[in-house]
Amino acid sequence: MNYGGYSDVSQGGASNPRQAPPSPSPGLPHTNGMNGGMAAGAALVGYPTPAGHQSDLNYVMSMVEELSGILRVNQQLTANVVDKMGKVRERAKNLDLSNDELIAVVAQELNEESENLEKENSELRKALDSTDFNKKENWKLAVHGAEILADVAEKLHRFKEQHESDTLAWHKNYRKQLAEEREENLSLRNQINDMKASASRASDNLRQMRRFVADNDQWTELEVENHRLRTEKRFWKRMALPLIPDNDSEWSDDDDLIDPEEKKREFIKREKERKDKEDSEDQLA
């Protein structure tokens, strides 16, 4: 793009730091950072562009780009106007209309287009209002959902805290009960061991006593002497009391001769015989 056509600054006016510098002649060599390497003077080769000139060039380029954009928009508008004018001329040519009729037709079309534009504008406004309303409602729903989620998160945190505290309390109580059960089990084991030790000592004492009784001749001699004396006493007692029957209680000390269980069996036998005798007498009567 050629930048040689922009306006030069008047020499009598005040200097503006944001205004473009004077236009150099296209045929003269000059140093501006872009074509300095192509200058004829060897002394100017390789020197950088001053900072002020570079900023001015950047500003000018931005202005040119902005003006180019505006020009493109104007060109599009002009092309649209020319296109519409061509359509109007073609319609006037085809329909053979006068100027007034053509103006009326074009005005009618413009009115229809404006009505369509107003209708579209109204629909767009309604859609915009509906969109704004939906946006507000969605925002309310989003806020409500966020509040619900925050409440759920808070409840979950409280539930987790309560659950952890309950679990810790349960574990603490369980460990306490387990320690008590272990202590009680240890106490029972100690009691059982003490009972076993006592039973072992008692069994040992019994074995020693039986061994003493079995191995001691003096004990055996005393037992034999006791049996002999009891027998001799019974003999002389029966000789002295011949009138006392054998089933009298006087002879109740004869347990060494008659087994106590045998006495019970004899008693039961006599009772049975007595009952049988009474039953037979009742039947005969």
Image: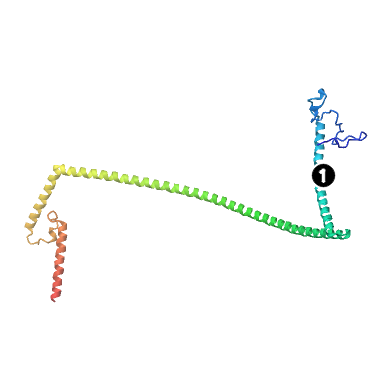
Indicate left or right for 128 with 56 as reference: left
In the rendered image, the residue lying farthest to the top is 43
**Towards the viewer: 109 or 156:** 109
Q: Quadrant of residue 67?
A: top right
Q: Residue at x 14, y 68 (%)?
A: 274
Q: Can residue 210 be seen?
A: yes
**Towards the viewer: 224 or 215:** 215
Image quadrant holding the C terminus, namely bottom left
**Colour scheme employed for the rendering of this structure:** rainbow
**Residue 135's x, y, as percent?**
69, 55
Q: Secondary structure at mark 1?
A: helix
Indicate left or right for 176 with 56 as reference: left
**Residue 175's x, y, as percent?**
45, 47
Q: Can residue 59 be seen?
A: no
The number of numbered badges drawn on the structure is 1
**Towards the viewer: 236 or 24:** 24
Above or below for 31 versus 201: above
Q: Which residue is mark 1?
A: 71
**Residue 217's x, y, as percent?**
13, 42
Kind of residue at disc 1: Leu
Q: Residue at x 29, y 45 (%)?
A: 196
